[in-house]
Amino acid sequence: MGLFSFLKNAGTALFGGNKKAAPATPAAPSALDQLEDAQMAMRLTNHVVSLGLKVENLNIVVADDKATITGEAASQSEKEKVILAVGNVAGIATVDDWMTVAAAAEVAPEPEAVFYTVVKGDSLSKIAKAHYGNAMKYPVIFEANKPMLKDPDLIYPGQVLRIPPLA
């Protein structure tokens, strides 16, 4: 469990993308704001499902630019992928993770991956060289971020990636 930060204006745009800018003076959320949050939560849920990520009793609640996720993931890596799938969406700045990992996976728990935010000029091989000492280990990072990544050459600044420990 934890709170993860993302770049609000970077990421996949889901059906219209970014929500309007917040007003300069905070006010109670209007009915329209609540409707937009509910629609974003539904889009995020559909996005996670469309990626084939498995979470029992998945529930996503959005309040402004924060998404709170609950449910039971099949594994630690699946849990991390759900966090990244939700956080790497335009309009989401933080993800509050309240997911659990299935009991079967707890017998031999997976180590947690490191999350890395892509900067301008990065490539998967450059990231692999920095984290593993070997640029040719980039397929490990690519595989760890499927299905969110479709091509190892298509990453963008602000995107957050999983960097799993080497086995």
Image (cartoon, rainbow, N blue to C red):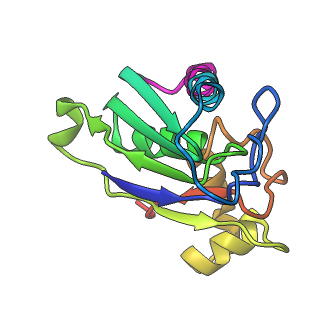
Count of all numbered marks drawn on residues in the image: 0
Measuring 68% from the left and 43% from the top, which residue is drawn there?
89
Q: Looking at the picture, does residue 11 appear above or below residue 17?
A: below
Could you tell me residue 78's position as x and y percent?
A: 44, 37
2 left or right, relative to 81: left
41 left or right, relative to 106: right
Magenta segment? 41-54
Q: Looking at the picture, does residue 83 appear above or below residue 38?
A: below
**Front-most of 84 and 43?**
43
- Inspect this view and state whether residue 73 appears: no
Q: Main secondary structure of the magenta part?
A: helix
Measuring 79% from the left and 66% from the top, which residue is drawn there?
123
Which corner quadrant holds the C terminus? bottom left
Q: Quadrant of residue 3?
A: bottom left
* 122 in the magenta segment: no
81 left or right, relative to 36: left
Q: Quadrant of residue 147?
A: top right
Q: Looking at the picture, does residue 57 appear above or below residue 29?
A: above
Could you tell me residue 83's position as x and y percent?
A: 49, 44
**Front-most of 11 and 36?**
36
Could you tell me residue 22's position as x and y percent?
A: 69, 51
**Front-most of 113 and 137?**
113
- Inspect this view and state whether residue 38 appears: yes
